[in-house]
Image: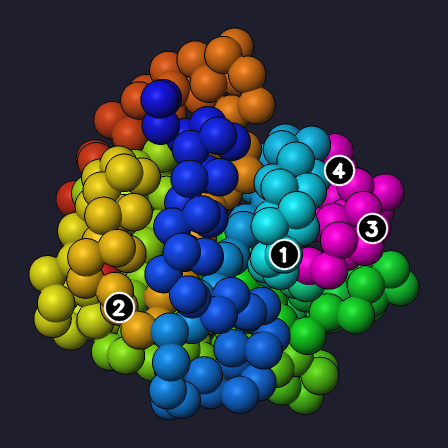
Amino acid sequence: MRDFTIKMYSKLLEALKKESYEIVTMKEFLENEMWNVGGKICVLRHDIDKKPENAVAMAELENKKGIRATYYVRFIEGIYDVDKLKKIESLGHEIGFHYETLDKTRGDIDKAYELFVEELEIIRKDFDIKTICMHGYPLNPWRNLDIWKKYDYRKLGIIGEPYLNVDYTKVAYFTDTGRSWSSKARVKDVIPAGNYNEKHNLKAKSTPELIDIIKRKKPEKIIILAHPNRWALGFGDWTSELVGQKIKNVGKAFLKKRYENEDII
């Protein structure tokens, strides 16, 4: 079976269910600091960077399996699709804000915060946003997370931000950034050193390898980030994503060396 297809994603969900993980939204996880409670808990986080139709298909699959996840959406024309997002929400999933206002304002933190507030107000006309998550565009030198060095999102009624409010020494983190579960493909989607994955030597490149970790090593707390656009609905979609990501990863390798001395998170 080809990796990064909706069928393979279904296999991942089945593994989590079989291993008796309680699957919760990011809001529930952050609100209750669930990395400090007993039992096996997993958060399925999805960043809708593009292809909202893939997000709907993923949300429908999860709903059929009795699973609720969190979908972070960019406020970009063609991606912020209210009808599709309402469909996702109706299936029991959380909608969050995948903000990128520091990129949009080219590094101006004050303007970025003002724009963040404006966009949040617009989105909140349709959705009750309680958690946010930065978008990381590798070609830009700015980190959207840096807004919160000066401002406090809690004053806006936001519970938390996964890159700031999770104790990753207690939580395993896997992301398909770069169409691979390997950290080599990441530029900005990184967590602090000394994290749970490093301490327990948890490494995976393919989804079958990730499933094997879930079955054999059974980390108690897991956050899995799966970008819907990476999980193909058909062969044409799968091929275009494969070719496009290989080209992007060449550029990411160069950028990673450029940023290697920076404290990304």
Three-letter code, disc 4 = Glu
State the image quarter where residue 57 is shown: top right
Which of the two residues, 21 or 203, is positioned nearer the viewer here? 21
Which comes sooner in the sequence, label 1 or label 2? 1
Q: Is residue 176 left or right of residue 70?
A: left
User: Which quadrant of the structure image shows residue 100?
Assistant: bottom right
Earlier sequence position, callout 1 versus callout 4: 1
Which one is earlier in the sequence, the residue at label 4 or at label 2?
4
Q: Which residue is mark 1?
A: 66
Q: Is residue 36 visible?
A: yes
Q: Is residue 13 left or right of residue 124?
A: left
Q: Earlier in the sequence, mark 2 or mark 3?
A: 3
Callout 2 secondary element: loop
**Helix, strand or loop under label 3:** helix
Specify start and end residues of the magenta stretch as a single range: 75-93
Q: Which numbered disc covers residue 77?
A: 4
Q: Is residue 81 part of the magenta span, yes or no? A: yes
Any part of residue 146 in sight: no
Q: Quadrant of residue 125?
A: bottom right
At horizontal 27% and vertical 47% (from top left) the residue drawn is: 210
Q: How many marks?
A: 4
* Image-based side of 236 in relation to 219, left or right: right
The quadrant of the rendering that contains the C terminus is bottom left
- C-beta proximity under 8 Å, tags 3 and 4: no
Which residue corresponds to the image point at 52% horizontal and 80% vertical from the top-left? 30
Above-or-below relation of 177 to 189:
above
> Residue 228: x and y, percent?
55, 39
The Cα atoms of the two marked residues, 1 and 3, are separated by: 18 Å
